[in-house]
Image: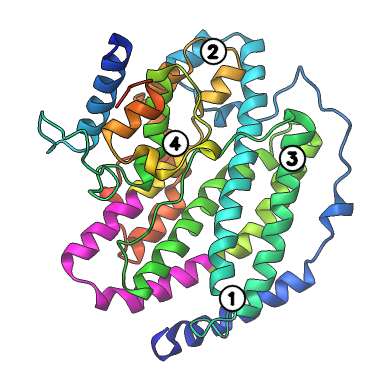
Amino acid sequence: MQDNVVAERLDAVVSRLSERAVDGYYNPYQLFKWPDSIPEDAPWMSEELLSCYGTAIWKELSTDERIRLSHWEAVNFYGLNVHLIRDLMLEVLRRIHTSRYPSVSEFFHHFLGEENEHMWFFAQFCNRYGHKLYEDKRLPFEATEWSDPNVRDLVVFCRILVAEEIVDFLNTWMSKDGNLPPIVRQINAIHHQDESRHIGFGRQMVTTLWAAASDAIDDAQREALQSYLGRYVLFTLHALYNPAVYRDAGVPDPYGMRSRLLADPERSAFHYRVTAKVSDFLDRINLVPRDSLQL
Amino acid sequence: MKSDEITGIQVILDFLRSKNPKLGEDLDPDLDLIDSRIIDSLAFVEFIFVLEAASGREISVDNVSVDDFRTIRSISRRFLDGAD
């Protein structure tokens, strides 16, 4: 990037985070003791995090139906992690050891290694206990709207940060939920532990890129950027509402259920809670005003 | 044109107009929805679900390409059993 601004400002942070990654290194292939099965009569995802919690639909469901839904929503959540990680790894791979990020590449190695391992254990959960991964319904579109390299990279690292912060809210919650099977709590706890470093990096990266990009764009571009990022936050939240999950859970009208849930004010309130930290951050650095978010 | 297809197209038009309130009543069936940014990457998944609901079939994105979604005509042909 111009004048290696990113390298200079990120040096201290990535150096510290790289050391912590080395000190905290673990072998995920040995760490987890995967049980052959996990209880079918217990939830696999915290009920407070289920996509219909707090709504009229939730009240209509029996205990058995709620538990069945929690199984498929868990498989969806970890599958979503797999898809998000694949995307972010591709973006970081495009940037490692390039001239724009000479001092960050060392950390990118740790980042990619850890994300690869996260993707492995999330996929393990889906395939062992759900016997499937839900399909990623996105198609790659040409991202032509951001011509300035600083803005383009800002969008990429902002997307990564938003996804990580939303996922981390759920991970933190489930790592402490005694109603969940131990392997579920462990997966969530381990992911939260690593993601705290990745989020620390992401915030520094976004702050630095925004400082470099903000002078290069005019008001119209700034407005377009804010609008896009606000929509991306909502887009990520909406991935938690998967009609295929509802179909597997026995819901007769999965698309209708999704529409009803997304229109429910209770779900909007949940979205604001899940994104409170990242919204505060984006507002604080004057990138996305909090009151512009429509969740 | 079959009645199911007409209903499906209407659902799609309603969705596109809900996302783009400035769209007029007459939408050219050959207008490129992607290049004109009527559908972008963030609206795409939502659009897939609308199409699945309208067609009654799940769509695997492994078996489609962006070009299948470029125009009302290509969408109709690919997902709603519409002829050219």
Q: Which mark is residue A238?
A: 4
> Are the residues under badges 1 and 3 in a single subunit?
yes
Q: Chain of mark 3?
A: A
Q: Give the residue at mark 3.
A: A185
Dot 3 falls on a residue whose secondary structure is: helix
Dot 4 falls on a residue whose secondary structure is: helix
Q: Give the residue at mark 1.
A: A96
Distance between the alpha carbons at the discs numbered 3 and 2: 27 Å
- Residue nearest the observer in this picture, A205 or A128: A128
Q: Chain of mark 1?
A: A
Rendered location of residue A71, percent (x, y): 67, 25
Q: State which mark lies toward you, 4 or 1.
A: 1
- Residue nearest the observer in this picture, A189 or B31: B31
Question: Nearer the N terminus, badge 3 or badge 4?
Answer: 3
Q: Residue A224 vs residue A167: left or right?
A: left
> Are the residues under badges 1 and 2 in a single subunit?
yes
Hey, what amino acid is under mark 4? His
Q: Magenta stretch containing residue A222, yes or no?
A: yes
Distance between the alpha carbons at the discs numbered 2 and 4: 18 Å
Give residue A219's quadrant in the image: bottom left
Above or below: residue B29 compared with residue A285: above
Give residue A123's quadrant in the image: top right
The residue under the point 31% across, 19% down is: B8
The residue under the point 26% across, 15% down is: B1
> Are the residues under badges 4 and 1 in a single subunit?
yes
Q: State which mark lies toward you, 3 or 4.
A: 4
Distance between the alpha carbons at the discs numbered 1 and 3: 33 Å
What secondary structure characterizes most of the magenta part? helix
The residue under the point 66% across, 18% down is: A68
What are the residue bounds of the magenta stretch?
Answer: A202-230
Hey, what amino acid is under mark 3? Arg
Question: Nearer the N terminus, badge 4 or badge 1?
Answer: 1
